Image: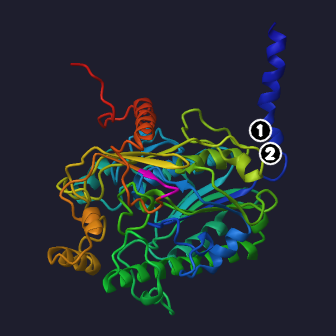
Amino acid sequence: MRTRFVIPILALAAWPALARGAERPNVLVVLTDDHSAPHVGCYGNRDIKTPNLDRFAAQGMRFDRAYVTCPQCVPSRSSIMSGRSPVDTRMTRFSAPLPAEVKVFPQLLRADGYYSGVAGRTYHLDGSRLPAESKSVFDRHHLRTFPDRLDFVKTGGTNVMMVNQFRQFLDQVPQGKPFVLQLCSSDPHRPLDRKAIVEPHDPRTLTLPPHYPDTPGVREDFARYYDEIARFDAAFGTILEELEKRGLAQNTIVLFMGDNGASQLRGKGTLYEFGVHVPLIVRWPGTVKPGSTTTELVSGEDIAPTLLEATGSAIPPEMTGRSVLKLLRGEPFDGRKEVFAERGAHGSGLPNNSAAFDLGRCVITPRYKLIYNALWQLPYTPVDFAGDPFWKELQAMNQDCKLPAHLVKLYFSPTRPMFEVYDLQADPAEMENLAGSSAAAAVEKELKATLQEWMILQRDYVPLPVPPNNR
């Protein structure tokens, strides 16, 4: 009996070695900061100037339904790197230190023979922008762990610094070793640069999203957001050129992704599409079909297991994400039925508004979305732009009763609904909340049950959407 089991086990154990008989691919993950999915030319946006990203998409696969696990930088990036949800890793608070026991994919690949690093806007998970009181805690308890996890750790705020650090990293890769690098841009994070590019976008010609008020201030702000994406696009082109110059392009998996949605109306800090739906494009010459697209649901926590499997490395059992390697290869793929996202504390503000503190969860299926606002008593509050001119313009218009009623309801209601249900096919702008309607009752019940199961399995601390009757 023992012999029957030994043979399959030996064959299974030999598989990774067989898979790695050829040269193992390098891995480059490039992240933008606060970038929603529609805002790249190749996603059908005719207003924005992104020639390098568009060309890159023509060489790889564009994901049309990629979602992050959180509309905030720190928890979302923790998922991208760890392959686990923020709730699972206790990373639901902005500026929380990544627990030392939570392994990240560059660290795992380092242990498997790769030269590994992070560069650019990388401070999110090590507490380097905390107030002095918190920094002292990080120092005393050795909570900054990335220098111990990786070979190369650099931080830089501009695209010039990011590109220079990329070159430094490549210069330091030992001969004969594959590399893995997560390279992060600060664009298009606020504050928005009014001189980001030489030929800025014309605010007057832009097509505004359906949930946007059409005002001069809104148009100006939106145009400057596009400018910063265009500035990143130029830097991204330089990065791709560097790979070509060094003869690395053909054996490097390049993955581009937004870390969370734009700091725009109903974007960053919210569970609406502009907050959690991000661009994702992957190029892998010889493996990914050029110009391919997919509408499969993909989560930020799927990135790490995908890259590990693609390089022939083992996927740790604690990872909750799913590899999409078969999808990249064009093979039959049993996709996700849903993805989940959470919203927690943001920045360093006190919990007196929904910008600094909010508790929300959502589940997204191919057609529907359920948002659970656990702190429904708090009104909508903008994240990162409460003091910006266009928001002050909208506040003044609201006070003067000059905003349309449907926009007042979206942005200036004193409270929010506890539950929101949207038909993303019929209503991609999420303007009509179906929660509580008889037409969507069955869908709402099913989505609540699905979210409830996920929250229970994640040991979530937020009250369940369908609380037990234990009286």
- Seen in the image, is 299 located left or right of residue 186? right
- Seen in the image, is 75 located left or right of residue 167? left
What residue is shown with label 1? 16
The residue nearer to you, when weighing 139 against 87, is 87
What residue is shown with label 2? 20
Residue 65 screen position, x and y as percent: 57, 56
For the residue marked with disc 2, what is the amino acid? Arg
Residue 22 screen position, x and y as percent: 84, 50
Q: State the colouring used for the structure image.
A: rainbow
Relative vertical location of residue 331 with respect to residue 34 in this rendering, above or below? above
Question: Which image quarter: residue 459?
Answer: top left
Q: Residue at x 40, y 30 (%)?
A: 456
Considering every residue shown, the one lying at the far left of the view is 399
Residue 212: in magenta span: no
The residue nearer to you, when weighing 413 against 245, is 413
The magenta segment: 422-426
Q: Residue at x 52, y 61 (%)?
A: 278
**Crowd around label 2: few <14 · some 14–19 · many ≥20 (10 Å):** some
